[in-house]
């Protein structure tokens, strides 16, 4: 039996009859950029996130970039984030002209260790950029408390966490602005690249709209220089259809995660911890093993596609050598990089596939 890491074909097969006419409509209207599909999807996504405003953009990376610029980060500033994330998080900081400053993560959730944020703050710090890694919210209340006291912006990287909840509230508008990715493999994925910012702050929303569309509020009038970061109509139409299914898909991801955790209870690997404040949406289901690489190889030989998120912490990447960190700078994140293994996770995963993955792990252990 082969178990893929994600199965986008299985998902498309379910919703083909809704997707195809939605795309056709965009083509018939030639509403390729902007247009009614985009406006409708922005409203639907804002409602979904319990946020006042949602602004579609061209990717999660673009969302993070404009979020930082719109909340006041610029050249010479510092932004606090984590070293165990996808490089887009820190690319956005650099694109805004600022410098990433890392803090280590909590060993249970692998999200930012809120006890270590204050010691990383300097007079140059402008923002905190927590990542809701794997689909589990970071501990937002202490983050907002520190940010409020120190006058910092909070930009949520919710690119893996569509619909996740913190103390009953959706992620995205818990901070000043939240950023989502609609990369095809994300929990809500487009048929190409796409992203979204959500916020309750009308000033930030207006600034984001300007920045994402060449600094233009009306035709031929540019109040500032911006970017070409728009979300296109076809992606918005696809995402509108898929958003209606997201609650159901999330329930199934959570069910699959629970099955993995039950079946692995007495096996010598560490399964994910869902924090008491969190509703985790399991973009990734990760296990931790001190023989991770051999286990990954064994599972691949059993036909199980596994992933590594992320095998080299950002502070040890060549791209960030200039930041001056080294081995041992962030011991928890470094241990995650060595021990975390992502198992196949998607809504359509079957009980047989889950059993096959678990049996593979049991054989190895
Ligand atoms: C996917 C992802 C991004 C970037 O999103 P893109 O849409 O690919 O630009 C940023 N941060 C995290 C944590 C991600 O998983």
Image: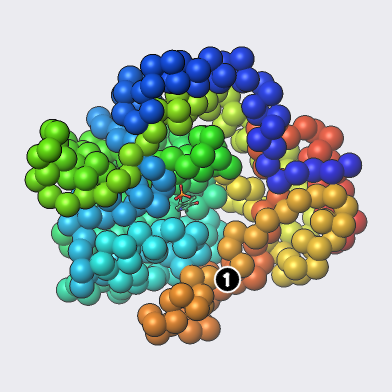
Q: Let me know if residue 208 appears in the view.
A: no
Q: Let me know if residue 75 appears in the view.
A: yes
Helix, strand or loop status at disc 1 = loop
| Residue where numbered disc 1 is placed | 312
Percent position (x, y) of residue 26? 43, 20
Query: In the picture provided, is 332 more to the left or to the right than 70?
Result: right
Q: Which residue does the image show at 60% across and 59% down from the upper left?
A: 309
Q: Quadrant of the C terminus?
A: bottom right
Q: Residues within 10 Å of mark 1 (few under 14, many from 20)?
A: some
Percent position (x, y) of residue 51? 29, 32
Query: In the picture provided, is 114 more to the left or to the right than 68?
Result: right
Question: Residue 200, relative to residue 322: is it above or below?
Answer: above
Query: In the picture provided, is 300 more to the left or to the right than 173?
Result: right
Q: Which residue does the image show at 87% across and 57% down from the upper left?
A: 301
Given residues 223 and 328, the one toward you in this image is 223
Q: Quadrant of the N terminus?
A: top right
Q: Which residue does the image show at 46% across and 75% down from the upper left?
A: 319
Query: In the picture provided, is 133 more to the left or to the right than 69?
Result: right
Q: Which residue does the image show at 44% across and 58% down from the upper left?
A: 88
């Amino acid at each position: 039996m082969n178990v893929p890491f994600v199965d986008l074909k299985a998902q498309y097969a379910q919703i083909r009859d809704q997707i195809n006419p939605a795309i056709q409509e965009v083509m018939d209207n030639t509403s390729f950029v902007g247009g009614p599909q985009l406006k409708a999807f922005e409203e639907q996504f804002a409602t979904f996130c319990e946020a006042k405003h949602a602004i579609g953009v061209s990717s999660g990376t673009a969302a993070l970039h404009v979020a930082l610029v719109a909340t006041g980060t610029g050249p010479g500033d510092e932004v606090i984030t984590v070293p165990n994330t996808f490089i887009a998080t820190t690319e956005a900081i650099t694109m805004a002209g600022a410098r990433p400053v890392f803090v280590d993560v909590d060993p249970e959730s692998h999200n930012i260790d809120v006890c270590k944020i204050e010691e990383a703050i300097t007079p140059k710090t402008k923002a905190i950029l927590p990542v809701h890694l794997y689909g589990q919210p970071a501990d937002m209340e202490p983050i907002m408390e520190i940010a409020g006291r120190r006058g910092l912006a909070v930009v949520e990287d919710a690119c893996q966490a569509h619909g996740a909840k913190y103390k009953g509230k959706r992620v995205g508008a818990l901070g000043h602005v939240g950023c989502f990715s609609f990369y095809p493999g994300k929990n809500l994925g487009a048929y190409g690249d796409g992203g979204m910012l959500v916020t309750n702050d009308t000033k930030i929303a207006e600034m984001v709209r300007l920045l994402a569309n060449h600094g233009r509020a009306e035709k031929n009038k540019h109040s500032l220089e911006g970017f070409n970061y728009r979300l296109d109509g076809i992606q918005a139409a696809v995402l509108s259809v898929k958003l209606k299914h997201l609650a159901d898909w999330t329930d199934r991801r959570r069910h699959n995660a629970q099955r993995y955790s039950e079946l692995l209870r007495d096996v010598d690997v560490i399964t994910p911890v869902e924090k008491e404040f969190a509703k985790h949406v399991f973009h990734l289901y990760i296990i931790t093993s001190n023989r991770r690489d051999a286990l990954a190889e064994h599972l691949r030989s059993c036909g199980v596609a596994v992933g590594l998120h992320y095998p080299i912490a950002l502070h040890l990447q060549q791209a960030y050598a200039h930041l001056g960190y080294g081995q041992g700078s962030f011991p928890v994140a470094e241990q995650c990089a060595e021990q975390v293994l992502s198992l196949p996770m998607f809504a359509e995963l079957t009980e047989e596939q889950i059993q096959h993955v678990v049996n593979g792990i049991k054989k190895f252990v």
